[in-house]
Every structure is written in structure tokens, then in C-alpha cells.
Amino acid sequence: MAASNGKEGRTRVAEISGIYVYIKDSYDFTDKLGEASQYLGHWSKNGVIVLAYNGAMSYLNEPRLYFSYPVALGNPKVRGNVYYPVHNKDFREWAIKHQRGGDFVIYSDRKLVRIDPPIKVYL
């Protein structure tokens, strides 16, 4: 902040030379009325995989076209190697049954955006 005689006799001026921006997104695990429940991937205790085919089919809104079977990565007898298809409705049912889970919000990293010329705010 620099002291000066600016507009209308004000003596202080703030110069804004940059701002930070970020993206905020929320996951609510709800589906639109009349549409197929959104595919969230195939889940196991080891993590999540996404079948490209199911990802593409989600845009068609045709649940009968989904690959709705478990998928094994490696030996299916090893705990966590079998991944099960999960949709919004499945997650909601699990959350209600176990009184866990729920909606969440994620934020991107901040990015500095320079402003040139700076914006002057007379205080």
C-alpha cells in the first residue's frame, strides 16, 4: 500500500498486482431423477479402477450397457485384488447402512494470476 494524494483527496492507495484463483468442486453422490445412477468406478480395499468402457457408457445413460461384474487384477484369491462396480446409489446405500461417508468438497491448488497494469483502489 502506498501513501499518495489520489482521487477525491484520499491519501491511501492499494495496488492489486495479482490474485490467487482456485477451483472448488463438490461430490454429493446423487443422481438426476429418471437417469441411470452415475458410475464411480470399480472399488476394492486396494483402491479404485475405472473401466474406460463404463466411463464411456455413462454418457449414454443406459445402465444395461454397463459392465456390471467384478474385475480381478492379478490373483482373484488375494484379498483386495477383486474390484466391484460402484454407482452413486450403491455409495448412498452403504453410507446409510454404516452411518459413514457422505458428501465432500475438493479444492484445486491455488494459481497466481498477475494483473498488468495493476488495479488501483483508493481508500
Image (spheres, rainbow, N blue to C red):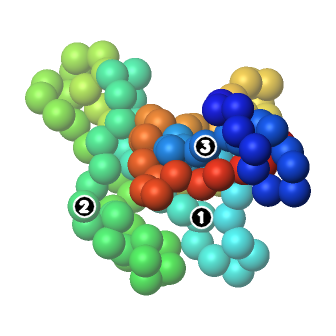
Residue appearing at x 31%, y 50% in the figure: 50
- Residue in the foreground of this view, choosing between 4 and 114: 4
SS state under label 3 = strand
Image quadrant where residue 82 sits: top left
Image quadrant occupied by the C terminus: top right
Q: Marks 2 and 1, Cα distance to the nearest angstrom?
A: 17 Å
Residue 43's place in the image compared with 98, above or below, is below
Extreme residue in the left direction: 74
Residue 95 in picture, x, y percent from top left: 72, 34
Q: Which residue is drawn at 85% across and 45% down?
A: 10
Q: In the rendered image, which residue does mark 2 sit on?
A: 52
On screen, residue 115 versus residue 2, left or right, reads left
Q: Which type of secondary structure does the marked residue at label 1 adopt?
A: loop
Label 2 vs 3, first from the N-terminus: 3
Q: Nearer the viewer, residue 93 or 10?
A: 10
Quarter holding residue 1: top right
Residue denoted by label 3: 15
Disc 3: CA contacts within 10 A as few (<14), some (14-19) or many (>=20): some
CA gap, disc 3 and disc 1: 49 Å
Q: Mark 1 points at which residue?
A: 37
Label 1 neighbour load within 10 Å: few <14, some 14-19, many 20+: many
Disc 3 residue type (three-letter)? Glu
Residue plotted at (43% across, 83% down): 60
Residue 34, x across and y down, in percent: 70, 80
Q: Which residue corresponds to the image point at 35% horizontal and 28% vertical from the top-left?
A: 47
Q: Earlier in the sequence, mark 2 or mark 1?
A: 1
Residue 73 lies, in percent from the top left, at 17, 34
| In front: label 2 or label 3 | 3
Amino acid marked by disc 2? Ala
Viewer-side residue, 116 vs 70 = 116
User: Badge 2: how crowded within 10 Å, few (<14), some, or many (20+)?
Assistant: few
Secondary structure under tag 2 reads helix
